[in-house]
Amino acid sequence: MTSSPAIQQGVENVQGGLGISVKSVSKYYGRGSQREQVLENLDLDVAAEKFVCLLGRSGCGKSTLLNLVAGLDNPSQGSISTGGRKVGVMFQEDNLFPWLTVGGNIELALKLSHVPRPERAARVADLLETVRLPGLEKLRPHEISGGMRQRVALAKTLAQECSVLLMDEPFGALDAFTREAMHDEIERIWAERRLTILFVTHDAREAVRLADRVIVMATSPGRIDTEIDITFDRPRRSDSAESAGLATELSNHIRRPLR
Ligand SMILES: Nc1ncnc2c1ncn2[C@@H]1O[C@H](COP(=O)(O)OP(=O)(O)OP(=O)(O)O)[C@@H](O)[C@H]1O
Ligand SMILES: [Mg+2]
């Protein structure tokens, strides 16, 4: 088993800078007659500093896979490595505490990352600059828009100094205009911080806008269906003919009848 060429290739890549390595991962939920296989023998390598989107229908296991990579749950079989890199996670719902200010939320993340108290105010200000919300420390989450809350949630995740960022439909609840603005922001922050990003979406246009590589998942059980590299110049426009054409092709592929 361990002499499989594919697995040996993976090991070499880890040494050469793999951000995320998923090997022969299966995941089951439930027991006995209720046992359901959600992921089947999944292999996925994400090179360091790449932006990879996981695209697939609802229920194909995208969030399950992301949670396994995040270490929030364990695979039933197989193994996952992020090469010791620090991992941050961001979900569709912001993870802000409503009783803390924007600054207080970010400061808490810094405190949990053991940043000494005297350094925290300057770091909070820097992180708010990074997500283009300078000076908003004193506001409460309910006083800012959904898009701004997701920026603060991103600042809170970046406060952990992660180099691998896992994002589960982080902009899914935002309106189209705000989502486009967030695409520009995450692309800039990814490049500036040289992050490795695994980004879950069921929106093919979003995947084509952001990804170096799109992994398309098939369902029941969840597995990798196909992968494509996207080499269009950045920043991309979702409404350009080449992006729109590829997104339509991918959407049609996902919609096709299952075997
Ligand atoms: N904790 C759990 N216990 C039992 N079954 C689960 C659990 N979490 C997910 N599932 C099942 O696993 C399958 C995959 O779920 P998952 O949430 O990973 O899909 P998804 O691709 O993220 O879907 P969506 O696009 O709707 O978010 C579904 O059939 C779901 O019902
Ligand atoms: Mg999901």
Image (tube, rainbow, N blue to C red):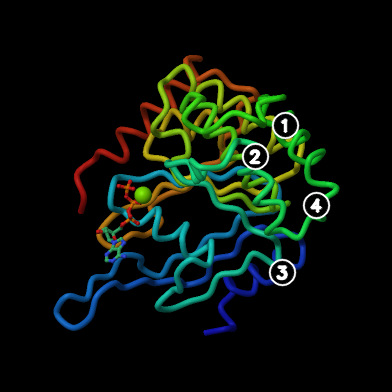
Residue 211 drawn at (x, y percent): 56, 37
Quadrant in the rendering for residue 140? top right
* Marking on residue 118: none
Dot placed on the residue nearer the N-terminal end, 2 or 1: 1
Q: CA distance from mark 3 to mark 2?
A: 33 Å
* Residue type at tag 1: Thr
Circle 3 is placed at which residue position? Answer: 12
Asked if disc 3 is less than 8 Å from ligand 1, the answer is: no
Dot placed on the residue nearer the N-terminal end, 3 or 1: 3
Viewer-side label of 1, 4: 4
* Residue type at tag 4: Arg
- Establish if 78 lies above or below 90: below
- Disc 3 vs disc 2: Cβ atoms closer than 8 Å? no
Circle 4 is placed at which residue position? Answer: 117
Is label 3 in a helix, a strand or a loop?
helix
Q: CA distance from mark 1 to mark 4?
A: 20 Å
Residue placed most toward the observer, 155 or 213: 155
**Number of marks in the rendered image:** 4
- Disc 3 vs disc 4: Cβ atoms closer than 8 Å? no
Dot placed on the residue nearer the N-terminal end, 4 or 2: 4
Circle 2 is placed at which residue position? Answer: 155
* Marking on residue 130: 1
- Disc 2 vs disc 1: Cβ atoms closer than 8 Å? yes
